Amino acid sequence: MNNFLRFSLAFSVFLGGMGTALPLVAQKKGNVNPFPYPYGNPVVKHMYTADASPHVMPDGRVWMVTSVDHPDGGGYATMHSYHTFSSADMVQWVDHGEVLNVWDVIGSDKEPEGEDWALWAPDMIYHNGKYYLYFPLRILHTDTVSANGGRVVTSYIAVAESNSPDERFTVINPKIEGTRGIDPAVFLDDDGKKYLYFGNHFGALLTDDMRELATAPVHMEVHDDHFMEAIWMHKRAEKYFLSYHRHYGKPIDPNNPDDPEREKSRLDFGVSDSPLGPFQYQGVLNRELGVNVNEGPVLPGYDFVPWRLYQSNHGGIVEFHGKEYLFYHTSALSSWWQDYFEGPGTWTQRSVCVDEIVYDNQGMPLPVQQSLRGVDLVRVTQPALLTVDFSTAIPHKNASLRDKSIQVTGGNASVTFPRVNLGSGYYYARLQAQGSEQGAVEFHLDSADGPLIGTILFRETGAGPDVYETFLRGGAGIHDLVLVYTSDNKKDSVTLSALSCLAGAPAAVKMKKTR
Ligand code: FUB
């Protein structure tokens, strides 16, 4: 938050110079406009949300956890809770309510004296029957150690767990050893490895129980001196894309915040063949709205929509039934609520927006233009559950069909399920298996050395006895699905007795809160 802190400091010095006792964040603005917000973006229109982290969960819906900005503004220290939201079509979002707040973490309803605790950008992921919420604790406190004292920030990453993304989370590790900084992002790779990214471009493997770092954090090479925060990892066509919010050249001038020369906020990205880099810097993924905008209201004398982000944006990316979407935040809603687009919105009164990401023919994302319109409704027409027919299975080396099950033995065995229709997206494979304690089943498309789209590691416990799950990346279209069993122990064997692929069961989702 260097730019923000610099700006806050400049702004408080400016206010101090005016001889006022105003708080650090002085842009408190009431929400006075009674008219409903008329545009598609932001997608959540009844409250302020920021820092969305979207993932498809086993119910087939896209879920996001978001930070919550205070309705009256008040700055980053007033961010005290997380909400989850879900959608089956990318347009209509259900608010599932608060799932964690800062008091759950502190364990009382009072902050320790002299400290401001805040919950900043989180991420939520499903793994083996549980939901994990990774979040940064950001504590503003008085530094008694340094010679001059003063207000300093401490931050690190914690994790909470729940059985359902719409239920309250319980903190299971209040400080993940080895982490520091903000903005955790979790990434489950197709080989079964789990990564936690955080802070100023650090990445590490997570333990199987998702509670700790399994390896020392790597300071990843991003080949860009302007990295600021908001790290996000997504994978497409075997490439790893690391996106983040970039520092700007100079802080906003509080006396001239609409300066047309002001360098705009940007999300940038880099690409690698490995989840821990090095990443080759590629350029811009998303620019603050304010340039090249062809829709929406404009103020006389301005060539851009009159809201500004005050140096905040935060990206999250998800693939959903064949399209990829960028989640980010703007001040569109606060601009509307506060003054009917007659002036700028306010920082930390932000709102989550969604636009589509389109790739060029080299497989690189084109810069996403922030829009008021948002995205088209997605209609999912396929069944939520696909049961793979074992009677069609073709066993290869070291595999044999036995009654209604398949036994695979040894260091390397495989079985093909021909022409499985994975529709426009089946996101989780659920395999019933018995026997192995240390091997892995890899899911490949079309042949044993075709694209790897998911891996089950048998050392992990599944959602129920002998039921194991893995996320399938790119599980779409008609393919031969080839399961490859690997184990270091040649005598090891496993019996596979059922396989299904889930795109969810939208009708069964619990709608706890709708507004
Ligand atoms: O929302 C609080 C902070 O602002 C986040 O942690 C950053 O990514 C930025 O969005």
Image (cartoon, rainbow, N blue to C red):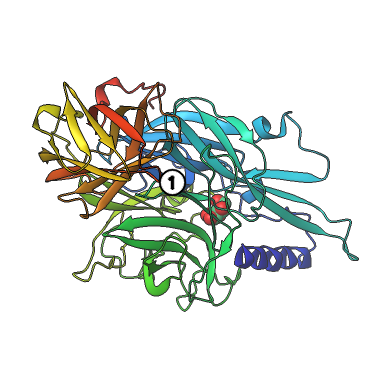
| Residue 352: image location, x then y, percent | 41, 47
Q: Quadrant of ligand 1?
A: bottom right
- Amino acid on which the number 1 mark rests in the picture: Ser
| Residue 168: image location, x then y, percent | 53, 26
Q: Residue at x 12, y 45 (%)?
A: 479
Residue reaching furthest front?
491
Residue 184 versus residue 307 in the image, above or below: above
Nearest to the observer: residue 192 or residue 198: 192
Q: Which residue is drawn at 26% across and 30% down?
A: 504
Residue 5 versus residue 389 in the image, above or below: below
Q: Which residue is drawn at 23% across and 61% down?
A: 358
Q: Is mark 1 within 8 Å of ligand 1?
A: no
| Residue 319: image location, x then y, percent | 28, 49
Q: Residue at x 10, y 27 (%)?
A: 391
Mark 1 residue element: strand
For disc 1, the marked residue is: 53
> Which corner quadrant of the image does residue 46 belong to?
top left
Residue 342 versus residue 85 in the image, above or below: below
The C terminus lies in which quarter of the figure? top left
Residue 313: tell me if it is visible.
no
The N terminus lies in which quarter of the figure? bottom right
| Residue 163: image location, x then y, percent | 47, 25
